[in-house]
Amino acid sequence: MKITNGVLAILFIIFALLQLNDPDPWLWVAIYGAVGILCGATALGRYPPKIILGGILLTIFGIGWYIPHLMDWLENGMNSITTSMKADTPYVELVRESLGLVLVLVTLIWLYWSGKRSSNKGI
């Protein structure tokens, strides 16, 4: 699990750096960077369960905020969100961001589970 969390740390730091050209880089660099740091901390045995749980709750709230945009995308026929990097319709960027939050949520749940498991084993 340490290797997986280390790889996730590197990936999320790369994701954060790739957000520097985003319309709202401060938000996404902070989100992906924080997840990268949490992954790295957990890989190094510094498991912060309360912070991870707080991140899970914030991410669930964030995903909830995007639900109307996801519904709009679904109602409009689920047009491709990967055709080009430019957001051609208003919901394309919002759908991409919501999927980014889903990735963050899955990763934070993994971190909580893997950290809890490692700390229970004394690893």
Image (tube, rainbow, N blue to C red):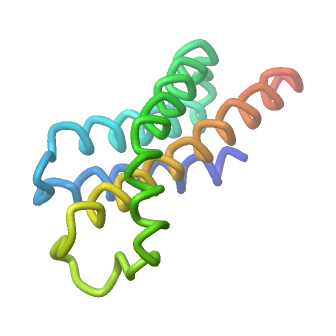
Identify the residue at the far front of this view. 75
Residue 39: where, in percent of width, then height? 52, 39
**Looking at the image, is 85 positioned above or below residue 6?**
below
Number of numbered callouts drawn: 0
Side (left or right) of 66 relative to 50:
left
Identify the residue at the far bottom of this view. 83
Identify the residue at the far right of this view. 121
Q: Which of these two is toward me, 67 or 103?
A: 67
- Residue depicted at x 19% and y 71%: 87
- Residue depicted at x 37% and y 33%: 34
- Residue depicted at x 48% and y 40%: 63
Residue 81: where, in percent of width, then height? 35, 75
Residue 115: where, in percent of width, then height? 71, 30
Side (left or right) of 21 relative to 116:
left
Name the quarter where the C terminus is drawn. Answer: top right
Residue 74: where, in percent of width, then height? 49, 67
- Residue depicted at x 39% and y 80%: 79
Q: Quadrant of residue 19?
A: bottom left
Side (left or right) of 75 relative to 105:
left
**Looking at the image, is 39 positioned above or below residue 88?**
above
**Looking at the image, is 29 positioned above or below residue 4?**
above
Side (left or right) of 37 relative to 14:
right
Q: Quadrant of residue 72?
A: bottom left
**Looking at the image, is 15 positioned above or below residue 83?**
above
